[in-house]
């Protein structure tokens, strides 16, 4: 198929590459001509503007927007809606808030343009491993795009098949290849959002566990229950037959194998919206998410020193007990 | 009555003072003779050793130990058990772990010595306001000591009486005066421990709330939902008719009235055992204590920068997404 | 002064009553004529429609809307904006989301109508104790309304004054009387929202503490650390000189004095928006709120049995360990 | 090698089987003769008592105890210590609390008997996949036992090797085969304990995420952000290239493929000690473990209905707001 990829960041460029490897024709665009040139040398058709992109695509045109969520994606989708003709499809492959998808799909529908949201996991490894995709949109559009998703997905590969798959009605046979049609517009990014919410929780569980291991060598502990543990080896052994083996553990083991002290990292951990939105979605549904929220808050806390709240704790302690906790 | 107070720290000295004001005779002892001298000038009988303490008391002798929990209290109780005669009473008024009380009371019982544990709240304000006391021990000993507890307690005072008090069987009429016989040895410190566990939770609730108020002036927020709030006024107004009025809020309001920025405080917040023990007790009972534990953990977190776990989060993020969070 | 109170629920009716006691003239309106009649008998002027309300007020007209947040308040404010003339003031005294205030105040400003948001704490006790009020709005309007707020507020009363009040520049002398002008439109409800967020945290801290006390009598514990505690007495004694005394503890003590088992209560606990919004606000500011969120989630959890997530835990346990957790 | 396996539960029997497959000679014992008979038919040597076990082993004798932690293991280790000669080795392969290992190893050392603790992960899948083992004990004993651990471990298998392994000094080359010598006695079970603590956190992260997905079909949500998601497909697609792929997700996908509603599970989730001990260890080290504790508490909560604390919340709400939450 022919389609355009708009946004030649790490994700966009690799998606273009994987599609070309799969035999698809790709028109690429980026605000920075340099990125377009790079992809042109790899076989893509370059474009210098969105108008030019539109001109180089056959109808129905397929625009895959791969830009940072928020303003960059919003303005690009808006511009494409002006350029698009009935039957065209706009795909948002970024980390968009699902309610923005719902709103945009409504606007697009009035122009008879299809809006498809694709939550994409796989990060920098996707080019090689394939992208895990959660797709929202109308069935006709999603079906039409199937060859594209099929090329991007990991495929069956060597991952063992789940016993009992497809025994229930309504299951999606594409899931085993690494993509699903999750539901109407917004559903793709909703599922991806929860994926990231879970990711935060999993990461924090490992982080706390390794913290407990690391803290066991503290000389404030009695000598007979103090252990000087090799975290690199522990991460490695847990990869092999333990209940907690996972890809995140593989990455942890690799990082620790490189440097057990992780001295290259600041410990100030960013968050990118999905963790926040997952907690918000949970609150809309009145679902308790102690772990997902705690994981998010731990990241907030990692980025500050001496919160105001902590000072107030000290002030109260001073008030009732004369405990002195002043800076030295 | 006549009794000895062992340990002339802030708490011990003020307890001795309040007892003398109440007409009781007090023998005081401390490792530091200077503290003993101070109290002698205020009317107490001084003693230079535990043996001397024992010699100066009528029988049955009453020893009130008011020392830091752990080794200091343990060794003193042990020494007193050697000095004590059948019928004597040893009171531990410190912040002892209740299981230590249970163990010590068993040893004391074999010598026909009574062991009474008194959890004491009120901090530096107790001399003036009176001490709130939660008492564990055998009924006979606790009853015998009643004049002492009565003198230390706040009494009915001006606090409005709870409607319906004493309508149920088994209620303790002493509660309205500010002390209760909570149960057998250990029960006093158990109830005090939970009191402190709750205290941590309450404090953290205020801390987080004021953090949210404080953060509302951040220029990362859209201008129309950004507020520059006066935290001093807010603490004050909440003291007056709001649902969240409390003594801890009074202390917060006083601290903020002195300095809205709380610049005198480091934000590194200590914890003193009871929070930890409360979570442990909850786990023994399989009771979920999300708030009490979170309050404790927030204090741990306030005392470190850049945890190992946080670095591991960054390392994983780098692993799957190429996110760079390195020190600069 | 003359003003209208729209909404004769428990809160609205009592606010009207307290204003009349303070010498103000009140026009009352409610969809249910019966409530209007009741207040008429107590001295208010009744009205049968919003138009009639408007007609019975002198200019500038003051409309105090006291309705459930969301649709009822929204539609009433909208209707009043149609009726209002330049200079009129609309007060929203309900539990409105502060961003709705910001939006409405913008619309009102275009009509030269002032919009004032008043977060009100004090619940069913306000008629007697006075209402604690957190006010958002333009200074001119808030100043004009001062006699009304003064009449509703608790006043200095018998609550001890905070040492050092008004030593800092910019403090609000009204705080000691129980109301503050917190900031521009929305700031009043923002502060009230955080108040409720803290309230949830405080309540959950007490709830968990009493749960730990209650669970201590479990016969799964070793006999020597098992205590059968009298929760009624413990709540009472903590009211008297302890660090955790508060109004919420007073209410707990009263409930327990009535029935130590609290058999009248289902344990399914509602939440009313502010807890949720506080967590949302915290996330906008990247502030960790472990306690405030945990308190909210505990309420969600109290209202369901056997969550899907819990079943998934059981399913995983069965998967890796053959642990059987099936319904019986 | 020759060794005895004491305890023919699911774990013990499969360990015996895997050792026999690896060419080792196994003497088996269980209180229930039936289990011993089963293993005898598979090639093991049976024994009717611990004395008989000791008599059938060459010196130095190796006893692998595979019993429930607590009393069963304690009494068996005690009995073996009476039977053992200098040079013998007692292995505890159960889920023992690491402080019990430290204590027992001290007693064993006085008899010149080695005590080795082996934390074993892999559950019912270990026979097939091999067991991931974390070993504590003196180097000489652990080295002597190497052929046994080698036979039980998964070995290199098909799991991709971690880039950069063994570049740092002090790394354990056995880790890649699925076992490590973690440190002195107790260190093995300590690492296994933290493994389980992490496991609870990971499981709860998935549980909460799937709860949020499941709750999205609630008709209390606005129709355009309500999705009816297929959880079976979502679990499957996340196995394929997503950041959150893991063995626990594989198990979840299999459970959901069998029954999307998980109707076979009660949602009352047990915990087995390690989660509790991990939180305790963290508190000893003053490490915040918001996620690991929340995961544990969620299990506690899953096993009760209408906690006392929840009722107290309702009682307070009734107290300040007249909110009625009574059973119907």
Image (cartoon, coloured by chain):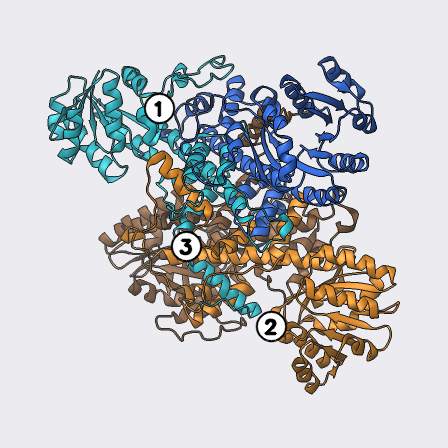
Chain colours: A brown, B blue, C cyan, D orange
Mark positioned earlier in the residue sequence (2 or 3): 2
| Residue pointed to by mark 1 | C129
Q: Residue furthest bottom?
A: D41
Could you give the CA–CA distance between mark 3 and mark 1, rounded to whole angstroms?
Answer: 42 Å
* Above or below, B87 relative to D156: above
Q: Residues within 10 Å of mark 1 (few under 14, many from 20)?
A: some
| Residue pointed to by mark 3 | D212
Q: Are marks 1 and 2 on the same chain?
A: no
- Which of these two is toward me, B43 or D68? B43
Q: Say whether marks 1 and 2 touch (CB < 8 Å).
A: no
Q: Whole-percent x and y of residue C184?
A: 34, 24
Classify residue B145 by image quadrant: top right
- Which of these two is toward me, C188 or D171? C188
- Residue A45 seen: no
Classify mark 2: helix, strand or loop.
Answer: helix
- Could you tell me which chain the residue with mark 3 belongs to? D
Q: Whole-percent x and y of residue C101?
A: 30, 31
Q: Are marks 2 and 3 on the same chain?
A: yes
On residue D125, the disc is 2
Q: Whole-percent x and y of residue A260?
A: 70, 51
Q: Residues within 10 Å of mark 2 (few under 14, many from 20)?
A: some
Q: Quadrant of the C terminus of chain C?
A: bottom left
Please tell me whether mark 3 or mark 1 is closer to you in this view. Answer: 1
- Residue C293 seen: yes
Q: Quadrant of the N terminus of chain C?
A: top left
Left or right placement of residue A167 versus residue D54 in this view: left
Q: Residue at (68%, 82%) from the top-left corner?
A: D39
- Which of these two is toward me, B113 or B304? B113
* Above or below, D71 relative to D158: above
Could you give the CA–CA distance between mark 2 and mark 3, rounded to whole angstroms?
Answer: 30 Å
Q: Residues within 10 Å of mark 3 (few under 14, many from 20)?
A: many
Q: Residue at (64%, 75%) from the top-left corner?
A: D127
């Amino acid at each position: 198929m022919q389609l355009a990829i708009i946004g030649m960041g790490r994700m966009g460029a690799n998606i273009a590459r994987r599609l070309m490897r799969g035999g698809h024709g790709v028109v690429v665009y980026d605000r920075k001509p340099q990125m377009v040139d790079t992809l042109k040398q790899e076989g893509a058709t370059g474009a210098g503007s969105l108008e030019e992109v539109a001109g180089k695509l056959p109808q129905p045109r397929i625009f895959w927007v791969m830009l940072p969520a928020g303003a960059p994606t919003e303005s690009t989708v808006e511009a494409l809606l002006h350029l698009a003709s009935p039957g065209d499809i706009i795909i948002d492959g970024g980390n968009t808030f699902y309610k923005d998808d719902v709103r945009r799909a409504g606007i697009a529908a009035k122009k008879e343009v299809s809006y498809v949201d694709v939550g994409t996991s796989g990060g920098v490894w996707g080019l090689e491993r394939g992208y895990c995709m959660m797709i929202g949109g109308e069935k006709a559009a999603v079906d039409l795009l199937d060859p594209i998703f099929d090329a991007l997905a990991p495929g069956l590969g060597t991952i063992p098949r789940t016993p009992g798959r497809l025994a229930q009605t309504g299951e999606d046979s594409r899931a085993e290849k690494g993509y699903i049609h999750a539901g109407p517009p917004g559903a793709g990014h909703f599922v991806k959002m929860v994926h990231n919410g879970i990711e935060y929780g999993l990461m924090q569980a490992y982080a706390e566990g390794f913290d407990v291991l690391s803290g066991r060598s503290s000389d404030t502990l009695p000598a007979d229950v103090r252990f000087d543990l090799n975290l690199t080896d522990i991460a490695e052994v847990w990869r092999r037959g333990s209940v907690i083996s996972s890809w995140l553990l593989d990455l942890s083991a690799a990082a620790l194998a490189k440097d057990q002290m992780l001295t290259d990292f600041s410990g100030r951990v960013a968050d990118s919206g999905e963790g926040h939105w997952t907690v918000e979605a949970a609150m809309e549904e009145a679902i308790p998410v102690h772990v997902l929220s705690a994981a998010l808050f731990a990241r907030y806390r990692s980025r500050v020193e001496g919160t105001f709240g902590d000072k107030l704790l000290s002030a109260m302690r001073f008030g009732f007990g004369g405990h002195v906790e002043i800076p030295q």
